[in-house]
Image (tube, coloured by chain):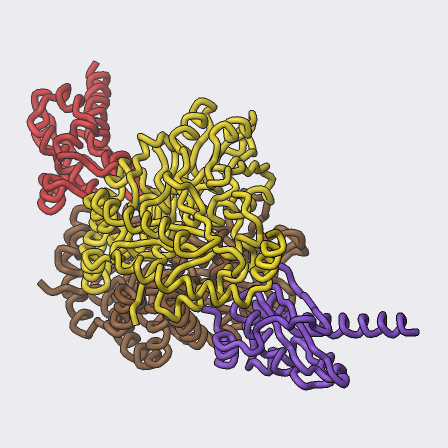
Chain colours: A brown, B yellow, C red, D purple
Amino acid sequence: MRKVYLDNAATTPLLPEVREAMLPFLGEVFGNPSSLHDWGDTARQAVDAAREQVAVLIGANAEEVIFTGSGTESNNFAIKGLALAQQSKGKHVVVSAIEHFSALHSARTLEKWGFELTEVPVDKYGMVNPDDVRESIRKDTVLISVMHANGEVGTIEPIKEIARIAKENKIVFHTDAIATAGTIPVDVKELGVDALSLAGNQFYGPKGVGALWVRRGVRIMPLLDGGVQEGGRRAGTENVPAIVGLGKAAELAKASMSARIKQLTPLRDRLLKELPASIEHVMVTGHPQNRLPGHASFCVEFIEGESMLMFLNMEGIAVSSGSACTSRALKASHVLIAMGISHELAQGSLLCTFGLDNTDEDVDYMVKVLPPIVDRLRQMSPLYSKFIKASKGGK
Amino acid sequence: MRKVYLDNAATTPLLPEVREAMLPFLGEVFGNPSSLHDWGDTARQAVDAAREQVAVLIGANAEEVIFTGSGTESNNFAIKGLALAQQSKGKHVVVSAIEHFSALHSARTLEKWGFELTEVPVDKYGMVNPDDVRESIRKDTVLISVMHANGEVGTIEPIKEIARIAKENKIVFHTDAIATAGTIPVDVKELGVDALSLAGNQFYGPKGVGALWVRRGVRIMPLLDGGVQEGGRRAGTENVPAIVGLGKAAELAKASMSARIKQLTPLRDRLLKELPASIEHVMVTGHPQNRLPGHASFCVEFIEGESMLMFLNMEGIAVSSGSACTSRALKASHVLIAMGISHELAQGSLLCTFGLDNTDEDVDYMVKVLPPIVDRLRQMSPLYSKFIKASKGGK
Amino acid sequence: MPVYSEKVMDHFMHPRNVGEIENPDGIGEEGNPVCGDMMTFYIKVKDNRLEDIKFKTFGCGAAIAVSSMVSEMAMGKTLDEAMKITPTSVAEELQGLPKNKFHCSNLGAQALHKAIEDYLSKQKAQGEKKE
Amino acid sequence: MPVYSEKVMDHFMHPRNVGEIENPDGIGEEGNPVCGDMMTFYIKVKDNRLEDIKFKTFGCGAAIAVSSMVSEMAMGKTLDEAMKITPTSVAEELQGLPKNKFHCSNLGAQALHKAIEDYLSKQKAQGEKKE
Ligand SMILES: Cc1ncc(COP(=O)(O)O)c(C=O)c1O
Ligand SMILES: Cc1ncc(COP(=O)(O)O)c(C=O)c1O
């Protein structure tokens, strides 16, 4: 059976070059970078080289890059650490309503700790309006965090504009660039942000590693206390092989970014066009233009995501959904709801994300396989029969 | 040149079997365990199998094992998470004075958050007296954390007795078993603890992964907010290859623990005996009997650790020291100081930790190579010349 | 995928009794699309027995399998017997359901009961009319 | 290992002028073992010049290299010239020192200055005695 992985937003495979770069660090080169001997030196040099590679990817200084254990850790560290470091100045934090849970729930934990939180709304494309951010600012606002792009609907946010507003108001601005760094150009200076999260497994690097970039001079409280690794900002023995892999992935991403974008965008565009053309009552979610290159997301009316995923899986196709049943929290995607999509429609959420292994044949296959599945599920769906009856009745 | 790695307390090499187990997860098997398709299923099954392997190692139920990104994260999670979850009951926490910084500094962060902290002292062997723990308990004590063994001086603590005292007083008890789990028998039921930290890179497993075991029914606040991975207690895409490696390392450790102990103990005992016999003014640190099997630690009088490490490194030998110059915080080891060792003596700290690759020839080599190095440094040392003059004067 | 039993997968892939009944004797609807699962049961009753059962379901794999299983379990049973079908007995017949799926998707028994109650209340109304 | 320059490594491995001087004209001690670094400098002075310098050092690689370098830089210099040697000039001669090593281990210039001051104050005391 044909196997088609269209879930690159969930995680990407390792590139062979990345794996090659990591392998020595799962073998001979096993030292602890903090150790004072050759074994430690080799490990430390590898970590520093990776730090440089990551810094180059985002146009930053290497010493401003802090390695973490995941994108989630980067976001927790940023939101909690930046807010706590400034709490004497004020206790108000602003985030968008469509942040990833690792940012949103971190902000809500701050609420438990006595902070106040404003969640800025989005429009029907999932786009934050910079004016809404401006209006949310108070005298005691110490942190604004808005994601660079949303992983569920692919929409790219106007970070430059928001960063400018934060700067005008002298408020620290963090962006979760986990869906963008390594995928589209991300330059911390051009964006004008103060802190930025990224993660390896979003651009063909390893799992178990992320990074937080924090502009020099911006204070942050550690999330992980202990030794003085990472300049005292993130304790714990470094995950050397994963860090090396992240560095390599960053280098490769930087070098071939425009080629990758050129490869992915036509696949995405085909699917965005052809799925709604071949199945009635399918809507595209997220921004029609300002979206991630490999990102195609939809809502399929009258059916539920998990059963759609199960049938697709039987045909060898891997995708995701933001339906309640597919979330382990059993709630429909807060992103879709914040965009004004009804709960009913959100249940039919379908997320297809292309990666470097995908081809036009994968689009053909998806467009061939999905319509009968949707049809089958609709034939079972009480919502669909109600709709049919109502529209017949209307005629 | 002969290469002798005697720094297994800093980190251990990966066993080939562990690397083999991990490799598929750096290749074909790259799915996100949260994903609802075959790619996700395979990854999730691997994570669950590893959870079972870790549970077996420590005599626990698999669903009580939470994977983390490092030993440091496990300790931060335990100390902060267990204390915060109970703060309505009280805000007093007890730790030993010789905890690893990841535990000690976490406890000190709790102090900043309004908790009170008691640091229980140790004797000259680095041993906690359970009676001191008993006396430290107050009505508002909600958490006691004492490490199972100290990585710097190898002393194994009387955890069973301390756990019993905690239980009598209905106080949650956590132990940092990072230096012991996978090295000596660790059974959560036998120890009678409520929570236990462990880390992969201490027993021939990978870096970048640890685990926290929390007894069912004991409440803990997440350290990493976000998705509902790990039962909602630790968010973030799982580091699948590292988790698989940790599982394999746990399985191997369980199977060959007594053989490993039999291999390491004689090497340790030889060095503990032969170094002080071949160099004057060398004292053993830590407990003479109740110590980790591969762990030999010393203080070499009149000289400083870093220069000793540098000369040893030139001879191909890797060891550690707890001297101020070798710590990146530039302070002599808090462990040695807590044991009543003078700052001056602590500067000559020397830590040799054996692993499965070491042999008797390594002991021979160390015992041959170190004396001239010590002699050379003592010839340069003003402390040594003062000592010689004083003792001559005394004659 | 959720860890579904073979039986669940069988009923998910080959659901029994999908459809609607024209002029049913009773209709029962349970759940709502906000939660992600919704089921409609249609029944035909003859001599106090469920002569025919059909359903339509919007929901996850478990919800579809539950509906199918309930229809199979209840088919031909007396109304009293059918009223004794519980979420637990359905889950057992299905060789278990994942823990987090138990409550949301296991609405089949309730939907069937609602259809039976619908039938009974209609009967009662008719009886009253006749009187 | 700390990232030491070639020059530091050279002076660490082959330190110049290690030792003590019998009946020195001045002795200077700087640092203390609590911090991890301690240096004792011994000097012989002739015609206002440092005719001989010896040192003993307890400390890290940098501390040993610094002591050796200071002794080499000061050898044969006038006392005034030697007093102008600073931690910064020593670090420069050593092709740099790691940032975190600068303050603790770079005590050589001070120790030398103390030895010179010791000599000068002894001179002064002798001069006063003569008067
Ligand atoms: C925008 C964004 N932020 C944060 C995360 C969390 O990353 P992780 O689960 O790897 O920790 C993701 C994951 O896909 C993401 O897309
Ligand atoms: C007893 C103990 N606790 C905690 C740690 C911290 O582990 P890591 O640096 O791997 O996070 C160590 C590290 O050696 C340790 O020995």
Please count the marks in the image: 0
Quadrant of residue C24 in the image?
Answer: top left
Task: Say which residue appears at 37% left-offset and 49% top-offset.
Answer: B272
Residue that sits furthest to the right in the current view: D131
Whether residue A217 is situated above or below residue B321 in the rendered picture: below
- Residue A144 horizontal side relative to residue C51, left or right: right
- Residue A63 horizontal side relative to residue D79, left or right: left
Quadrant of residue C92 in the image?
Answer: top left
Task: Say which residue appears at 36% left-offset and 69% top-offset.
Answer: B315
Residue that sits furthest to the top in the current view: C131
Question: Do we see residue A120 in this rendering?
Answer: no
Return the x and y of residue B8 as percentages of the image width and height.
34, 55
User: Which of the two residues, B201 or C119, is positioned nearer the viewer here?
Assistant: B201
Name the image quarter holding the N terminus of chain A.
bottom left
Quadrant of residue D43 in the image?
Answer: bottom right
Task: Say which residue appears at 61% left-offset and 59% top-offset.
Answer: B389
Return the x and y of residue D14 as percentages of the image width and height.
49, 77
Return the x and y of residue A73 as percentages of the image width and height.
43, 55
Return the x and y of residue D81 as percentages of the image width and height.
73, 84
Name the image quarter holding the C terminus of chain A.
bottom left
Whether residue D128 is situated above or below residue C61 in the rendered picture: below
Residue that sits furthest to the front in the current view: B395
User: Which of the two residues, D114 or B115, is positioned nearer the viewer here?
Assistant: D114
Question: Do we see residue C101 in this rendering?
Answer: yes
- Residue B314 horizontal side relative to residue A266, left or right: right
